[in-house]
């Protein structure tokens, strides 16, 4: 959350809070590093094969995500959720040396006393996308909405859902031959 970093929230309604010259950003670009050690619940890892993803519900402005030292994604849209597949990164064994080097900042979701995984998120306050986001709002650099890890059965995907409807003309006894369709691609 913004309150955890050494940078202040900024409110604007018409003027950019920095010299705006897209796609360039200011040389002074506050950047924060978030670090969390965590373990998954034991029933998540001992049951049937699963895939795992991490969802960020709001990060401003650009951010890079690493799990267990492996790069898993980059995004720069601060108002929409973004999801990254972390299944392969969670399979990496974590060394005791790395755990000792970083101290005791951790969060155990599972039954383990020592966290099994490390999440690093590097967040830059300004990006070339910042010039597209200047509405009447607070600039809240950093992670400003929830972050969650999702588990799904491996291979559980829904693709190309189709909903077909028939339109009727104004009079009930006349039918229209047009059949509009709505196609939605859903990835789980």
Image: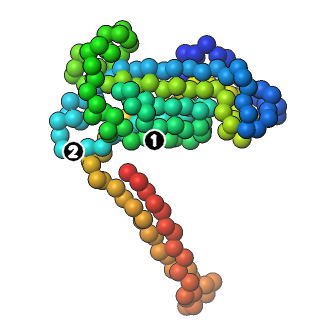
The residue that disc 1 covers is 83
For disc 2, the neighbor class at 10 Å (few under 14, some 14 to 19, many from 20) is few
What x and y, as percent, mark residue 114? Answer: 25, 16
Left/right placement of residue 14 relative to residue 105 reads right
Q: Nearer the viewer, residue 67 or 165?
A: 67
Q: Is residue 131 visible?
A: no
Q: Residue at x 52, y 41 (%)?
A: 81
Query: Quadrant of the image for the N terminus?
Result: top right
Determine which of the numbered discs, if any, sits on residue 49 in the image.
Answer: 2
Q: Is residue 163 left or right of residue 68?
A: right
Q: Is residue 148 above or below residue 110?
A: below
Mark 1 is surrounded, within 10 Å at the Cα level, by few (under 14), some (14 to 19) or many (20 or more) other residues, namely some
Tell me the quarter of the picture where residue 100 sits.
Answer: top left
Q: CA distance from mark 1 to mark 2?
A: 20 Å
Which sits earlier in the primary sequence, circle 1 or circle 2? 2
Image coordinates for residue 156, horizontal then vertical, percent:
30, 53
Residue at 23 percent of width and 15 percent of height = 113
Q: Is residue 175 above or below residue 155?
A: below
The disc at residue 44 is none
Q: Quadrant of residue 152?
A: top left
Q: SS for tag 2?
A: loop
| Side of 66 relative to 142 (left or right) | left
Q: Residue furthest bottom?
A: 173
Q: Position of residue 90 (x, y in %)?
A: 31, 33
Q: Quadrant of residue 162?
A: bottom left
- Provide residue 166's location: percent of width, then percent of height: 51, 80
Q: Are marks 1 and 2 in contact (CB under 8 Å)?
A: no
Could you say which is closer to the camera, residue 33 or residue 70? 70
Badge 1 element: strand
**Which residue shows up at 70% across the image and 20% down it?**
28
> Residue visible at 60% across and 26% down?
124
Q: Is residue 5 visible?
A: yes
């Amino acid at each position: 959350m913004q309150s955890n970093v050494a940078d202040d929230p900024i409110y604007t309604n018409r003027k950019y809070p920095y010299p705006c010259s897209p796609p360039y950003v200011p040389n002074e670009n506050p950047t924060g590093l978030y670090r969390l050690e965590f373990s998954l619940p034991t029933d998540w890892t001992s049951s049937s094969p699963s895939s795992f993803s991490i969802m960020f519900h709001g990060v401003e402005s650009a951010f890079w995500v690493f799990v267990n030292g492996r790069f898993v994604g980059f995004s720069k849209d601060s108002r929409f959720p973004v999801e990254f597949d972390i299944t392969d990164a969670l399979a990496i064994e974590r060394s005791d040396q790395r755990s000792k080097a970083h101290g005791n900042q951790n969060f155990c979701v599972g039954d383990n006393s020592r966290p099994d995984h490390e999440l690093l998120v590097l967040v830059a306050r300004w990006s070339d996308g910042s010039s597209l986001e200047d509405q009447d709002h607070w600039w809240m650099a950093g992670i400003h909405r929830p972050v969650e890890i999702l588990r799904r059965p491996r291979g559980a995907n829904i693709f190309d859902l189709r909903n077909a409807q028939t339109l009727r003309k104004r009079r009930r006894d006349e039918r229209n031959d047009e059949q509009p369709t709505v196609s939605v691609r859903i990835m789980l």
